[in-house]
Image: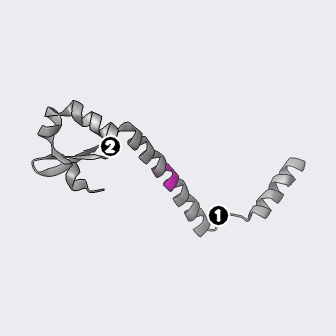
Amino acid sequence: MKYSTQIKPISYLKANAAEIMRELSEQRRPLVITQNGEAKAVIQDVVSYEETQETLALLKILALGNRQIEEGGVVRAKVAFKRLREQRNG
């Protein structure tokens, strides 16, 4: 995606808010808002935002799992199932 077509000044946002909201929902592309020529904010539709948050949560879980593997904080599945059986039959 080219962000160069998705950069607008804050004055454009103020003057075209309803149209921008419609386009965000339809196109599902974020919009970069500038103020005094500098990027200041990114706006996006709610569905895209929720998807991004879910993806970030999954990536955090994967990173934690990888860290546990690197630190030796895991056991083989065979050992884990054996422990569970022993606890259940206890």
Q: Nearer the viewer, residue 36 or 85?
A: 36
Residue at 38% in and 37% down: 46
Left or right of residue 42: residue 34: left
Please identify the residue farthest to the left as the structure is shown: 36
Query: Does dot 1 land on a helix, a strand or a loop?
Result: loop
Quarter of the image where one finds residue 17: top left
Part of the protein shown in magenta = 56-60
Q: Which colour scheme is used?
A: one colour
Q: Does the magenta stretch include residue 57?
A: yes
Q: In the depicted view, which residue is nearer to us: 69 or 20?
A: 20
The quadrant the N terminus occupies is bottom left
**Relative to 42, does residue 86 appear above or below in the rendering?**
below
**Front-most of 48 and 27?**
27
Give the residue pinned by disc 2.
27
| Residue at horizontal 14 percent and vertical 52 percent from the top | 38
| Identity of the residue drawn at 56% across and 64% down | 66
Say whether residue 32 is visible: yes
Instruction: Report whether residue 90 is seen.
Output: no
Of pointers 1 and 2, the one earlier in the residue sequence: 2
In the rendered structure, does residue 25 fall within the stretch colored magenta? no
- For residue 32, side relative to residue 63 (left or right): left
List x then y, in percent, for residue 88: 86, 48
The residue identified by callout 1 is 73
The kind of residue on which mark 1 rests is Gly
- Give x and y (percent) for residue 2: 26, 57
